[in-house]
Image (cartoon, coloured by chain):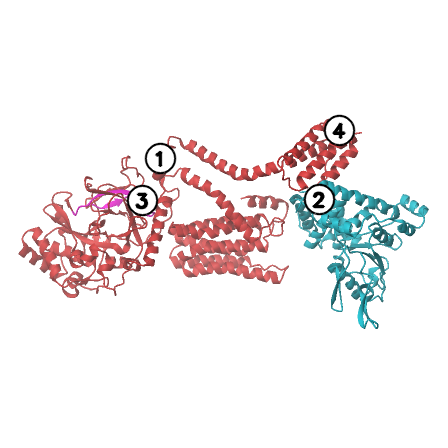
Chain colours: A cyan, B red
Amino acid sequence: MSVRPASQVVSVAQRAQAILRELSRIVVGKDDTLKLALACMIARGHLLIEDIPGVGKSTLAQALASALGLRYARIQFTSDLLPADVLGVSIYDERASAFRFHAGPIFHSVVLADEINRAPPKTQSALLEAMEERQVSIDGETRRLPEPFFVIATQNPVEQIGAYPLPESQLDRFLMALELGYPDPAAERELLAGGDRRARIADLSPLADAATLAEWQREAAALHVAPALLDYVQALLAASRGHPGATPTMDAGARRGLSPRAGLMLLNAARAWALVGGRPMVLPEDVQAVFPAVAGHRLAGGARAGALSAVALLRAVPLP
Amino acid sequence: MTTVARGARRRATAAPPALTAAQTRWIGAMIVCAQLPQAPHLPWWIAGFGIALVGLRFVLLRRDRARPGAPARIPSWTLVLFAVAAALAVRASYGYLVGRDPSVAFLYILIAIKFLEARTVRDGSVLVALVSFLLVTPFFHGQSPVAALAALPALLVLGATLDALARPADSPFAAAPRAAILRTARLFVQGIPIAALMFVLFPRIAGPLWGVPFEAGATTGLSDSMAPGSISELSLSDAVAFRVDFDGAVPPPAQRYWRGPVLSRFDGRAWTMAPRTAPGTLARFGAGGLAYTVTLEPHGKPWLFALELPASLPDPSGGGEDEPPARGYAFVSSDQQLLARVPVTQVLRYRQLSMLRDAFPEAERGEGADFLRLPSRGNPRTMELGRDLRARGGSDAAVVAAALAWFRAEPFFYTLMPPLAERDPVDAFLFDTRRGFCEHFAGAFVVMMRAAGVPARVVTGYQGGEWNPRGGYLIVRQSDAHAWAEVLVDGTWRRVDPTATVAPSRIEMGLSYAMADTEPVPLFARLDSGWLKTSQLALDALNHAWRTHVVGFNRERQRKLWRDVGIDRFAGWQLAALAAALGVAWAGIALGLIGLRRATLDRERALWSQACTRLAQAGLPRQPHEGPIAYAARASRRWPQFAIAFSAIAESYATLRYGPPRTRPGERDALVATLARAIDVLPAAGDLRSAAS
């Protein structure tokens, strides 16, 4: 692992800060969520947002795509949505007398999968498979998805009738699960006073491009992780699995435990977070910052309860 | 035994910690490993029963796994029943219960029974202690290197079991089986220098600290009587009687008569020792004498062996040449036997001097009369022959020569499987069968001499021995057991070996050369070349070296070693202090090597905890889960005036601990220095407290 000079990391951080500043003018009062979303993107993960409609999920996705200069598509998931509607379809072209592939909305760099739990499992899994593989196989032909490729899926926790909630194994495909939540009064005031946010997105000038993002992703992956930090991550994983002695005060909700893959993802997210924060190494603080978002939906009890038990877990595990 | 202590403390507060399945498996493995070296010394059914009981627990464990929640329990009355049955069976098998071997057998079974009912970690600790004791018991039967090797697996598993007991499998610190064994092995290896130091420095006690219990009749060797067949039976054994290291040249085989019990009483069939033996005088050591060291295997009898004639008294407790031999241990009898005052029940090593002579003067004038007695009846033809020899010969010397000539002339046959005669065995041998082993020849010759009026007696012992070129020493086996005769002619006892007359090759070259191929000569006595012989000799050399340097490292050898390196000037307590100091030094080195590395690596941790302590004293303790940057931010909010120092401390510490490894020299030290300086900038805890707004 090559050691990156700190100055380079700082410049990444400065550009990331500039992007976040721009974004915060559109998605008001959600600085931490924005930063997590950006880190999630830099860690090559996908984002799940569980929240009620109207708190700015699609605004966030669209703004993120615009600020980074990425192509954006939105798929509104409905109960009759078919896999082909997401992935694309081959249609016979009479003039060329051959099948021509019409790429689906998934062939965009930022895809907002809105209300993913309303689509039938078949369609859900088509999307999730594409997320995992970063490629699509249609009619025996494998097509690579654009790079970077970032999916923001939203789930409506209230409207569960006639919905197909994502199974836990599918939840694992998302690096982070976030809640946007209501804005605080000051932010809400600004929101109400400021007029339509969507219109502002159009004014947003891109501050980066796909190549830059790919470069950041490489840098994040190369960030140094010290043995002491691995000790800490292992202690967290062990505590999540409910070892006695490790977490005497842990609540029973977190009994399911984090998988080794979850640990790996936690490290990736912490690396990206450190990069955005302008640090040439990963600190326990970075792990703690991303831990509720990364671990919450992997622990039992849903994202909200999981995030709460993740916070409890963090408090219970001392730094080694 | 920390586990026991911890178990006791826990019991006061909560239920004792139960054994996990993994711990139980470790204990079972440990018991079996300790049972196996002992098993060959036990009756087969006891050995099998003990292992089967351990196996039973494993079966129950399997059942537990199939049906979790309902652990299988053996009712305790069954265990009592087992124990009582085992005691009765051991009693029946050995004929007695209080004694070394039955006690060991009983312990062997009881440990397995205890394992069946072991439920708590405390039970596990008790079993570890019991198994430690069981591990010692195979050494009652021999302290060979093989026995030591056989104990090694059990020792390793025992260490791993202690590990497993201290760290249950569900703890995050539990080790995989391989790792536990490796850790134990590493601990043992680290302990070797200390063990070696204690071996050399711990004062040996003149007698055994706690003697290895010796079971009579457990070993083979020459006895105090000789009936027809007794020595030929002994000759069937490969077992080593003793080994000899010569200081100088080794005498030729024909002169290697190792004198043992002298038998002078005859009841018509068997020869026995005289009931009382007066002390005698040793031959004077002079030119042509031999000096050598005998390593005698325990045989449960008081005889000690030396080449004829012994010129010194064996003194295993006083080996040095420059020390006057202690008079206490052994004495020489009037018939030139070397006798210890107590039976030889342990491996014995002694220096011995001998003059190679086959004649010596009688102990007192006129003692010959005692060596003419014969039973009044029986063996009439031999009596007749004796009288005949006397009538023809005249002088005693002529009678002896005539008798030997008679042996030569008649068709005698040397065999390990002579026919046994019920009545008048000497007559039957001399005139009918003419087939016999050395005891027949020697016995019959002495009877002939006595019948002819020449004082004579039988001497038993060993003759010859095998030279081991590997170790440069002589191996004398039970198959070298021999009997010969001594006659008193003109006030001088002379050795006469009728076997040499009949089968000279027995004396010149050894038993296997004198015997036809069909005779049941032991394998190792028969072999004279080939890889089996070579490897057998190599193994024996190893055994001998072990005997000499490990088992035979007694007080005197220790003293000699101390003298050689010059530490004998010190008093006992000084030596103890020296040993303790060296032991501590070694432990210090072993720990220090690890600690040293950790110390240089972890200076930042020490500094960091110093800073944390100071802030905690000032009223702002770090949360256990709080990272350095977060803590510094919190501290900066409390004491904004020191924000720069806090962030310098936190960042230099975080960089040292979590940053990429510093490759450039001095970079790391510079960071540590920054950390230390930033901490110096902070005021003392009391000042911080008062500085808080």
Q: Which residue position is annotated with label 4?
A: B689
Task: Name the chain letter of the residue that bears numbered label 4.
Answer: B
Circles 2 and 1 on the same subunit: no
Local SS, label 1: helix
Picture disc at residue B564: 1
Q: Which residue position is annotated with label 2?
A: A282
Local SS, label 4: helix
Circles 3 and 4 on the same subunit: yes
Look at the image and tell me in which quarter the C terminus of chain B lies: top right
Q: At label 4, which amino acid type do we have?
A: Arg
Task: Name the chain letter of the residue that bears numbered label 2.
Answer: A
Q: Residues within 10 Å of mark 4 (few under 14, many from 20)?
A: some
Q: Nearer the viewer, mark 2 or mark 4?
A: 2
Q: Which residue is drawn at 78% across and 31% down?
A: B639
Q: At label 2, which amino acid type do we have?
A: Val
Picture disc at residue B349: 3
Instruction: Report which quarter residue B420 is drawn in.
Output: bottom left
